[in-house]
Image: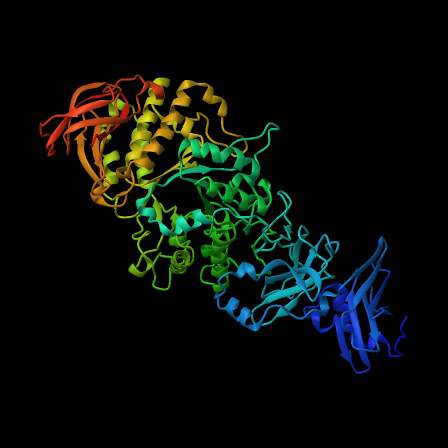
Amino acid sequence: MAAVPATRPAACIPAEVLQALDQGRCGTPFEWLGPHRYDAGWYVATVAHGATAVDVLQNGETWPAQRLAEGVFVAELAQQPQDYRLRIQWPAGKENISDPYAFAPLLTEGTLHAFHAGELRYPGDILGAHVLHINDVNGVHFSVWAPNALRVSVVGDFNQWDGRRHAMRRHDHEGVWEIFIPGVKAGALYKFELLDRNGHLLPLKANPFARQTEQPPATASMVAAPLSVSWHDAAWMAHRASVDHARTPISIYEVHAGSWQWNELGQPLDWDALATRLIPYVQAQGFTHIELLPISEFPFGGSWGYQPIAMYAPTARLGSPDAFARFVDSCHVAGIGVIIDWVSAHFPSDEHGLRDFDGTKLYEHRDPREGIHQDWDTLIYNYGRLEVRQYLLGSAMHWMRHYHVDGLRVDAVASMLYRDYSRPEGEWIPNKHGGRENLEAIAFLQSLNETVAREQSGVLVMAEESTAWPGVTRHVHDGGLGFSYKWNMGWMHDSLEYMKRDPLYRRYHHHDLTFGLVYAWSEKFMLPLSHDEVVHGKGSLIARMPGDRWRQFANLRAYFGFMWTHPGKKLLFMGGEFAQYREWHHDRPLDWHLLDDPLHRGVQQLVADLNSAFVHEPALHRCDHDPEGFQWVVGDDTHASVYAYLRFGGEGVPPILVVCNFTPQMRRDYRIGVPEGGLWRELCNTDSAHYGGSNVGNGGMVRADAQSCRGQPYSLNLVLPPLATLLLRPERS
């Protein structure tokens, strides 16, 4: 054992600092803990409450530390401490570790300046918790933004959740705190413990940049290992970047992963099981993409993920980050894209989350007229704060870079665009020009879409936007928001209102199905029949159809035929494809037993066939966003509730004639004009017995007469099945 210098260790640290260290109230721990020179030599100070002894080990020598306070130990050395270790005697045994306070800061001034200016492209690569190897020492680097905190510590299962043990280094100007803790490994649970500017202890906070969490209802962050998945999707990624998505078929199967299907034990499927079951199902149904309701970790299951806490972490409910990456990779290998719902409009008020993060309104607004969502009792991000915008942009890019996701559906965009969204007069604050537009949110959304377009070619960004805001899908440089697609909420509302009416009265609401074509090309639209349409007492799609059981199914089949042939990309929530009767509920699986019924199987087969036609017939998708891709043939037959239109795919592409009869009356000798003579093949008849219909039709083939009709040089004399949609295509040699 080395000789102990005669100087008393108490002279190294002033009494008031010693007390602050012992009580966990020192905001500058790196000025006192670890190795330091002082007048009489060198000392190493450490905090280890509950320890019975601490020694400093260096070059084969042992330097015993003296206890200067309940948890503060100081060892004096005769030589400069280098590459030393701490041996701590706990009641349960000894621990031999490197000293976290012996490591220099890892965040550079350039990085910190970029963070403060909101210029870090990938802030999640810097902040949070990252497994590192420094100077032959393994450990984890923790960092967090908390500019108004007096002291920040890392607490976890590696230090008995004691906030006095690992107080962090503060970078004053930027308000970022950091520490490298040797010996901590992937899988460790942790949070941040903060004292506010007045020294009051705050609730423990999860890491905003956490890449993994423990499974709810537990709320700790988890140190994530780097992803170890072997990707096999290079061909998919290259193709994604090369195609014009506006001219390709996009048919999305919207999925709540936790309730799609359960296993034999009555538990939700994890990511690996979903890869085994969901992907083949989606392939068989012909969808091009899966859209997942939010998978960023969220505390309340009843929010369906729309109140996320950890914007960089896939929910632990369904498996590890590696498992989610494998799921995406498997989708891509199978030719299926993956879109995730992404929530940047608000965050929950759970105390372990972003609310009052450092004792102040850091991520949210100070004024509740700007900072609180009254509809959901959630908090609104302060988009004007550069660090907050950077946090959100970094999250979006994280899912694309690390998990190869193919798109984001941005939730509740309307609530972001308007300062008075769902607020009575006098309970909102106008913008600097006196208007209702949220200028900071607009700038954020434009930045998001520009960044994705620049750095992730081929990735889609879709807006759930329910108002008449102009230019949602217009390029940013032309004054738009820059989204790839906008959900067509007007089409959804009008068409469902029409379909739920008794066919006897549909003649009085004929415009409900024609009005959507008035504005169909004002934006690039997605036609959504989403989860929101089958919850909160609205009933399922099939339950909203009028009439007896046969008519309900016939109505739904005819409606799907209309939807899949209407201009716009498609989205259908799970269960709709086989006409689930019950409303969806997040705490139970879909009613798969219904497929024992031929009528339900018939709807399922119809959706698969409509997807096949949508994908393989260019006229049904290539000009979705071009008025030249659509032409009314019959749009004014209100008495018969018949609609007929042509879809075109450009030069050399055969057109598709669509005829919808939304009454239960079969109509013979119904003449419809067409642009070409010869034989026309019946591609799909939603009344086919194959789908559970009455099998009224045209024998599969009809010859066009040289008889003009409604401005077309030829015409077809058709039988229109009851409550049905027909698709016909000319046979070209």
Q: Position of residue 345 (x, y in %)?
A: 45, 51
Tell me the quadrant of the picture where the N terminus can be found. bottom right
Name the residue rendered at 31%, 61% in the picture: 477
Name the residue rendered at 16%, 24% in the picture: 703
Residue 535 visible at all: no
Name the residue rendered at 21%, 35% in the picture: 646
Q: Position of residue 279 (x, y in %)?
A: 48, 36
Callout count: 0
Closest to the observer, 191 or 147: 191
- The answer to which image quadrant residue 564 occupies is top left
Instruction: Check the image and report above or below for 510 versus 462.
Output: above
Name the residue rendered at 31%, 24% in the picture: 686
Q: Position of residue 545 (x, y in %)?
A: 35, 25
Instruction: Check the image and report above or below for 638 versus 4.
Output: above
Residue 657 visible at all: yes
- The answer to which image quadrant residue 587 occupies is top right
Which residue extends farthest left? Answer: 707
Residue 13 appears left or right of 426: right
Closest to the observer, 217 or 141: 141
Which residue extends farthest bottom? Answer: 39
Residue 424 appears left or right of 56: left
Residue 603 appears left or right of 585: left
Q: Position of residue 72 (x, y in %)?
A: 80, 66
Residue 72 appears left or right of 706: right
Tell me the quadrant of the picture where the C terminus can be found. top left
Instruction: Check the image and report above or below for 188 versus 169.
Output: above
